[in-house]
Amino acid sequence: MSKAVAHLAKDEALDPAHLAALESRCVVDVSDIPSLEETLSKLPEGAFTSDELRLGSCRIVHKQRLSRQLVFIGLRASDGRMIEGILRRGVTKTDHENMSQAATVGDVVAVTGMVERSKGRFSIHVRVIEVEEAWIDLYGPKCMFRDDALLADEPTREPAGPHGPGLWSPSFTAQHGRLLLLQIVSSHAPRVHEYVTLTQTGVTPLGIVAPISGPHMGRDERGLVVRTHKPNELVNNVLQDGAVCRFIQRWYALDALAPTMAAAAKGLISALTAAAEANTSHVLPLEVRVQCFPRTLEAPLVAALRASGVAEPNPRGTLVACAAYVYGTIAYGVSDTSLEGGDGGSAAVHRGERHARPSKMVERHDGTGQENGNGNKAVAAAAVADAPAGGGQVSRAFYKLREVASRLQLTLNVKHAIDIGASPGGWTTCMIESGCSKVTAVDPGLLYLPDAVIDRCEHMRMRIEEAIPILQGRSGAEAVALDLLVCDMNAPPAEVLAIARTALPLLRVGAPLVLTFKNAFPRRGEWLSALEAGLEELSTFAEGVQVVHLLANTSKETTVVGRVRAGPPVPRRPCYVTAWERARAIAGVAR
């Protein structure tokens, strides 16, 4: 603690002459935080600025009460930079008797006071604190504050800046790429986040925008915020990926950041006015669709748009205004969904037909870098077929195996694979269309395969217990040496692993194993124990074991991948005894 802070921590009141001197100081409004950082870096260690500074639009993200006389607050500026605030009883002007009630976590405030440099950090000794937008006004008294910046992929402790450690700027600012918000089916939000992270290059998923905790939670309020320099490429890749496009409902371009909802509404009104001036076919008031994350933000935004006279909220409007609470700020943007025809809107997927609808939510260059006739830059439309090339009947299992290959860099282009529990043929079709020369499909049920893959499939209509001796008895040119084993049977882990162990003599060393563990247990504890035991059992004859919850998996199943270990199976290790070890196993942490 610096000497100045230690002095302010004392309980005695300050000298009246000192307070009068503070009142008479010149107050300088600071609107450019980066230039402020450069100015403050020239301060000697332990020195104060000669003038008082007024920092507006700072959100309180942390508060610590040291005593009745002293409260520390963490302030994040609208661009993400951090500075410490010190509130001292008798110095800070507030209507509240209790210093800790002057402003609460989540409020956007303006603070005025002298700034001190201490150990490379900057602290503002607050004389005046003004609440610009209270958290409770937007989200209600029962909504907890969310500091999503903790999810960012940037260091939060004394990062090195151009002038040494000091203020912090997160990675979602404009110079690091454009923000895109993907609206996701709520149940699949974590899985989509993981999938995009592993499969999309040049894209940084920043985190999931979840409903603010409280009474206004909704199923469709989850969004994945990503940063990318090529939004068109991302959208087209997602639309062409059958594994993930079915779970993304809409996407939104977020072009600017605002510290408060009032500032975001003002920015949206300016953007809509500019859009009306650029397109003479638009007549005021504009019909605008409003989408907010969380939905509690819609009420103040709709009221502001109507009061401006520029826009009238309408669900069928071709213009879309989006605002989202992201990392302590309000990210917002306006998009025109009427570009290049097609109603599209912000919808990426039409559920009933499982195909992508054209969307113009990303107003940037398309894949060719060309602009349309109106001078507006629009994303190219893309389509996703319900079935793979070949036109056969495909089950949801098809997308499972394709996703495994994509996420884990698994090669399906092998000479000979076995599909245990193959009916109705989704995994067999996926392997053959991916280049597998031959698939032995074992299942008493029927297979529904495209004509193009039938010749490379050997269907053994029997149980696997009957098929294994037959395959082991083949010799000469018909001898079986399997390069891949997959199993999507509706069976618990123990049964699936027993089958896989039986087939080990047919598999080459290093051959991949792709197994689905089904949860058929009435209690979650039983399922966790069975999964734990299954992973331990698999690790005795397979290495590189990974556990993934695929987008195409249901909530009652988990996919496990490994490779056949060289030599005899190793002894089984003891089961986990702590909840932490069990959680690591379920999360697929390498052991």
Image: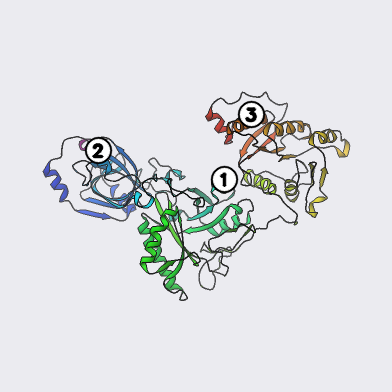
As drawn, 102 above or below 574:
below
Q: Which residue has dot 1 on it? A: 191
Amino acid residing under circle 3: Ala
Label 1 SS: helix
Q: Seen in the image, is 373 located left or right of residue 78?
A: right
Callout 1 environment at 10 Å: few (<14), some (14 to 19), or many (20+)?
Answer: some
At 46% from the left and 44% from the top, the residue drawn is 151
Residue beneath disc 2: 70
Residue type of the residue flagged with mark 2: Leu
Q: Residues within 10 Å of mark 3 (few under 14, many from 20)?
A: some
Circle 2 sits in a helix, a strand or a loop, which is it? Answer: strand
Q: Which residues lie in the magenta part?
A: 3-14
Q: Is tag 2's residue or tag 3's residue first in the polypeptide sequence? A: 2
Say how many tags the image has.
3
Distance of label 1 from label 2 (alpha carbons): 44 Å
The mark closer to the camera, 2 or 3, is: 3
Q: Amino acid at mark 1?
A: Arg
